[in-house]
Amino acid sequence: PYAGLIDTEDVDLNEFPGWDTLKWWKLNMEAGDCAYIPARWFHFVEAPRGRSLTVHVWFEAGGKFDQRSCDAMEAQGHNTSEYLLRISDCTWGQEPDKPKKTKCKVRKPAPKKVDEL
């Protein structure tokens, strides 16, 4: 596993000046929670002893948000307020004979209910 160069419990401010002036957020999560961390943001994950599973999914960061991509998904029948993929729908670029980038298949849109027609 990857381990950073900074001991977050005892940061050497001589080696990392400015550490104590960084803006930071603390996020407490429960089972099933998901957090979005913007591209190139440093983060630190800590879990209590016991069973714990943390999954990081690194998506290619676009230059800026483009509403047209959401509009196109909705035009295809997707509800963009619901999840569009599962972790099991992705390849991670580490499997033999697979693309090198992470790619995910988007779920098929749910059929419309009779009362929505």
Image: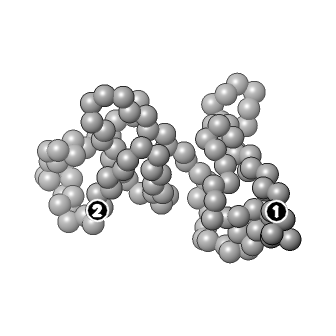
SS under mark 1: loop
Q: CA distance from mark 2 to mark 1?
A: 43 Å
The image position of residue 57, as x and y in percent, is: 54, 45
- Identity of the residue drawn at 34% across and 35% down: 3
Q: Amino acid at mark 1?
A: Lys
Q: Which residue is mark 1?
A: 112
- Identity of the residue drawn at 71% across and 64% down: 79
Q: Which residue is mark 2?
A: 24
Residue 6 picture quarter: top left
Residue 92's place in the image compared with 95, above or below, is below
Q: Amino acid at mark 2?
A: Trp
Report whether 107 appears left or right of 36: right
The image position of residue 117, as x and y in percent, is: 86, 71
Name the foreground residue: 26 vs 97.
26
Question: Mark 1 packing: few (<14 Cα in 10 Å), some, or many (20+)?
Answer: few
Quadrant where the image shows the N terminus? top left
Closer to the eye: label 2 or 1 = 1
- Identity of the residue drawn at 13% across and 52% down: 14
